[in-house]
Structure formats: structure tokens, C-alpha cells
Image (spheres, grey):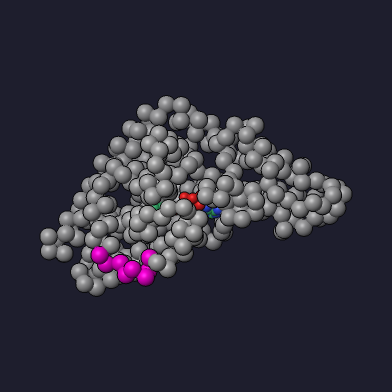
Amino acid sequence: MARILTGIQSTGTPHLGNLLGAIIPAINMSEDENNESLFFIADLHSFTTIRDKDLLRKNTYATAAAWLAFGFDTKKNIFYRQSDVTQVCELSWYLNCFTPFPMLANAHSFKDKSDRLASVNSGLFTYPVLMAADILLYDADIVPVGKDQVQHLEITRDIAGGFNHTYKDSFVIPSTKVDEKVMIVPGIDGQKMSKSYNNVIDIFLSDKKLRKQIMSITTDSLDISDPKDPNQCTVFKLYSLIADETQIKNLKTKYISGGYGYGQVKQELFDLICAKFKVEREKFNFYMKDTTIIEKELIIGAEKAREIANNVLTRVRKNIGY
Ligand code: ADP
Ligand code: TRP
């Protein structure tokens, strides 16, 4: 039995990149009989940047609603909110004392974020250590993440290896699982889709707003009559990530033949998203209308998570000598 663990930061409603790059592959993996999955909402990580309590809570619910809407089985698995298991903060401290300063200073996600923010707090700097604690606290075997998180996983493995070297058998060293097929989902401006770049496609918006987002995808200025290169087009890239082989082939022909405009292609992408995610979009709205169901799920999940966390923490404290 392999234990799969992954977290998603609650910095907004999960966008198409989060869904295709993290949530859907993780749920698919959790359906395997031989796996036990722990999925959590990383709301302590969100606290590195969010200072509005209503927003923090709303984001947590929106993130949870997305997992539930996409069919995550909370009975078979464990679904919880990071901040409900405070043991992670204790472990994070132990790991901090085992983390070489330059390793964090060189983390590209820190460099990237600190360049963009007006004020940079230490939480942002030690972000990968809390992430290591998230993983090691539960003896996770496999951590499915998007490509951008691979360096954080390397950091986790390094910290755990260093710790185990001094205190034998403290942690399970996790392996990373990147879905190679999906890679990086582009945003409406063509660069990586991210909440921080303001370029997301939020499939949970109303039809009208979602359509507006899709219509604003940047394209080149070729005329309707011109033949177009599908491989250079963000709309086509997004379409290919969701469509089946035949649909992709048909759209490719339209690009190459010419006489087909970007407005039409965008409409096809919109229709495809609506058809493909019809049920999930409805379920999302259902959960968001009354969040007591989400709250109940998270409380049950936290209880299950705490049981594992306490066992691991007892082992680690004993090894350290506390
Ligand atoms: P954001 O960049 O929007 O803040 P997060 O950093 O919260 O997204 O990412 C949550 C999860 O979704 C991670 O596992 C990440 O690798 C994945 N992810 C985020 N954006 C993308 C993307 N554009 N393509 C593929 N996966 C993504
Ligand atoms: N840092 C991850 C992200 O932004 C979220 C995260 C927090 C996570 N803790 C984790 C992912 C542990 C996997 C395992 O996407």
C-alpha cells in the first residue's frame, strides 16, 4: 500500500492549471485500490501572503469544493486543512534546524516570489521547510506535483536525508511524481497559468464570465483567411490538453486550412470546457452554496490526519531526545 500525499495552496479558486496539473492527476491516482491518499489544503502556506480572514476562509472552501466536485473520495482517503493539524508547525521547526541556509536562498520559487513582492517575510523564505514537514509528518511515499514544485521536493528529500543521517529511521524519503503528459498549462497570456500572474482560466465562473476569460486569450493578428500554426497558439495548446485525439485532429486541420478565425477557435474551447466539466461546475456551486458539508468533511479528515501525525511526531521527538 503506497501513501500518496499532496497539498494545494488556498490562494484563490483552483484554476485550469491547478486542475489539470495537480488535482485531476492526484484524484486519478487516489482511485487505485493499492493507494491511500492524503490531500490537504495548504492554508498555512497561504498565510505567507494573505492577510484578509474572510478571503483566507473563502479560498479554503473554494479549494475544498474543487476537490470534492472532481470526485475525491473522502471516505477511502484523508482530506484535511493544513492548519487543523498544528503538529506540522512543531515538525517544521525541527526541520528548520536541519536546513542549510543556502538551500533556501537558492530556491527558485523564493527568488521568483521575492522579486515580485513589495515585502518579503521569513515565512516565504522557509516555505519549503513547512512543505517538507507537510510531507514527512505523514510518512508519505509518493508526492504528485506539477513541474514547478519539483525543486521543493528535492529540498524535502535532502532535509529528510540529512535528518535520517543523524537520527536514524526518522523519516520515510518520499518520491516525486510529475505528470509528464500535462506539463505546464499556459494562461490567457501564453505564459504559465498562475494566480500570481493574473492570467487564469477559472472554469467555476458563470458561463458569461468564463467565456469572457477565454475570449481574452492572446493570439497573433493573422486574418481569418490566413492559414495558422496551431503549435504557436495558446488557444490550441489549451484545447489539446482537454480534447480527445479526434477533436484535436479536426481543429488542427481548421488551423492549417485557413478561413477559420481565432474567435471561432476560442468559442470551440469554451464549448469544450463547458461540456467536459459540466457536472463538476454544478457540484462546485452546490458545495459553495452551503459550506457546512465541506466543514464537516474537513473536521473528519483532520481527525484521521492527526492520528498519523502524532505517531510520526512521537517517533521524531524520541529520536531527537525530547
Ligand atoms: P499558482 O501558480 O496559481 O499559485 P499553485 O502554486 O498554488 O498555483 O499550484 C498548485 C498546484 O497546481 C501545484 O502542484 C502546481 O504544480 C500545479 N500548477 C499550478 N499552475 C500550473 C500550471 N500552469 N500548469 C500545471 N500545473 C500547475
Ligand atoms: N507548495 C505547493 C504549491 O504551491 C503546495 C504544497 C504545500 C504542497 N505543501 C505541500 C504540495 C506538500 C505537495 C506536498 O503548489
- Residue 92 drawn at (x, y percent): 27, 57
Which of the two residues, 120 or 249, is positioned nearer the viewer here? 120
**Rendered view: 223 above or below 59:** below
Q: What span is in magenta?
A: 97-104
Location of the C terminus by quadrant is bottom left
The answer to if 99 sits in the magenta stretch is yes
Look at the picture and state if 283 lies above or below 247: above
Name the residue at 34% across, 43% down.
81
| Residue 263 visible in the current orientation | yes
Q: Nearer the viewer, residue 12 or 125?
A: 125
For residue 207, side relative to residue 133 (left or right): right
- Is residue 41 among the parts visible in the rendering? no
Residue 79 location (% of width, % of height): 36, 43
Q: Residue at x 57, y 46 (%)?
A: 198
Q: Nearer the viewer, residue 57 or 143?
A: 57
Instruction: Give the position of the N terminus as an image quadrant.
Output: bottom left
Percent x, y for residue 34?
Answer: 37, 53
Query: Residue at horizontal 35%, vertical 33%?
Result: 295
Query: How far across and how far down the image is residue 40, in percent?
Result: 37, 46
Up/down of 192 relative to 108, above or below? above
Q: Which residue reaches farthest front?
A: 118
Question: Is 234 situated left or right of 284 in this image?
Answer: right
Quadrant hosting residue 137: bottom left
Left or right: residue 79 versus residue 183 is: left
